[in-house]
Image (cartoon, coloured by chain):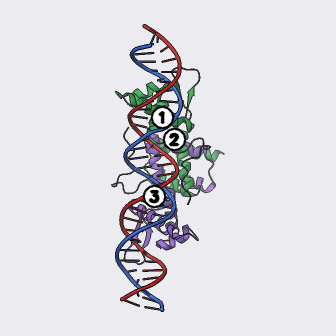
Chain colours: A green, B purple, C red, D blue
DNA sequence: GTTGATCCAAGACGACTTGTCTCTACCCTC
DNA sequence: GAGGGTAGAGACAAGTCGTCTTGGATCAAC
């Protein structure tokens, strides 16, 4: 059992994004591009000067993960998301399925069957099945 | 942004089980109950004495998480899983949906639509939908 | 009874992550 | 140049995770 390598640098977008970084991403999903200052004000309203550095570091790590990017030629620097929320959901779900179900979706589906589904979710499911059968 | 609390002791079964612990769980899912010795031999074939301690520690942490339990009155101690694989899948998926989709399954479903589904998975989906419509 | 092996609990350890904070240098504008 | 915002690079504590060690209990064989 070798040590967990965290995530290799070659791994472009890992499935897992920690909470504080996710909060930054949420901001960018809500509206982009944003400057570090804008993000800091939104995330730490009435915050101290140190929070600016915090957000900077979070952005730096998100950038290293390939989750956010800079808008060229802007000053002050502006950031935009490079992954969509759905991307992240997909990655996470795939990772779970891969690791726990050996790639089979069946356990996931049977779990869905046990969940309470809202009407619009049932609709989405119906549409999905129709689409699949159309292929 | 408060520090990540890891998981509170009151949290019975967290969604996330680290790799080495998962490997132990896999063993127990395959066949239970098992002794520490049996698990060690299976996980570290030809391993050193230290590995016994490793497996012990993993079991201890799994037990603290409520993922495994001891079989009463057996010596040497025997362990059995207290969570099923499907449980863990369910928890993980729910956690993702909760954190990234504000509880809505729609992004997950639309991701499934983009995935290649095997025939048996499509069947499971059909059955799921039939079941839902029957309610 | 002593020896030796196994078992079990508990802790120590290093590598790593994550959220926060600080220090410095760099522009700008006045 | 002084002051204010920006930017990049660490430093840091706390936590996680996989591993390994230690010390004591239990038990069988000699």
Taking B121 as reference, is A51 left or right?
Answer: left
On the image, which quarter does residue B4 sit in? top left
Return the residue at label 1.
A57
- Decide which of B76, A104 is in the foreground and name it: B76
Q: Residue at x 44, y 69 (%)?
A: B80
Q: Is residue D27 above or below residue B23?
A: below
Q: Residue B113 carries which label?
A: none
Q: Which residue is drawn at 48% across and 34% down?
A: A57
- Decide which of B38, B85 is in the foreground and name it: B38
- Decide which of A84, A106 is in the foreground and name it: A84
How dense is the environment of label 2, judged by Cα within 10 Å: few (below 14), some, or many (20 and up)?
many
Q: Is mark 3 on a helix, strand or loop?
A: helix
Confirm whether circles 2 and 3 share one chain. yes
Residue B131, percent from left and from top = 49, 54
Q: Distance between the residues labelled 3 and 1?
A: 36 Å
* Residue B110 showing in the rendered view: yes
How dense is the environment of label 1, judged by Cα within 10 Å: few (below 14), some, or many (20 and up)?
few
Q: What element carries label 2?
A: helix
Confirm whether circles 2 and 1 share one chain. no
Q: Which mark is residue B87?
A: 3
Q: Residue at x 45, y 32 (%)?
A: A55
Taking A71 as reference, is D1 left or right?
Answer: left
* Residue A113 showing in the rendered view: no
Q: Is mark 1 on a helix, strand or loop?
A: helix
Tags 2 and 3 touching, CB below 8 Å: no
Q: Which chain carries label 2?
A: B
Q: Residue B107 carries which label?
A: 2
Q: How far apart are marks 2 and 3 (CA)?
A: 21 Å
* Marked residue nearer the N-terminal end (2 or 3): 3
Residue B62, percent from left and from top = 43, 61
């Amino acid at each position: 059992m070798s040590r967990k390598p965290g995530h290799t640098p070659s791994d472009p977008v890992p499935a897992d994004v920690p909470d504080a970084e996710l909060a930054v991403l949420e901001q960018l999903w809500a509206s982009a591009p944003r400057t570090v200052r804008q993000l800091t004000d939104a995330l730490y309203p009435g915050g101290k000067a140190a929070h600016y550095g915090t957000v900077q570091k979070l952005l730096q790590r998100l950038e290293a993960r390939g989750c956010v990017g800079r808008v060229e030629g802007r000053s002050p620097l502006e950031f935009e998301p490079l992954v969509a929320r759905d991307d992240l959901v997909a990655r996470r779900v795939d990772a779970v399925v891969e690791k726990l179900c050996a790639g089979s979706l069946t356990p996931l589906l049977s779990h869905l069957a046990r969940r309470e589904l809202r009407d619009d979710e049932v609709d989405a499911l119906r549409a999905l099945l129709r689409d699949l059968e159309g292929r």
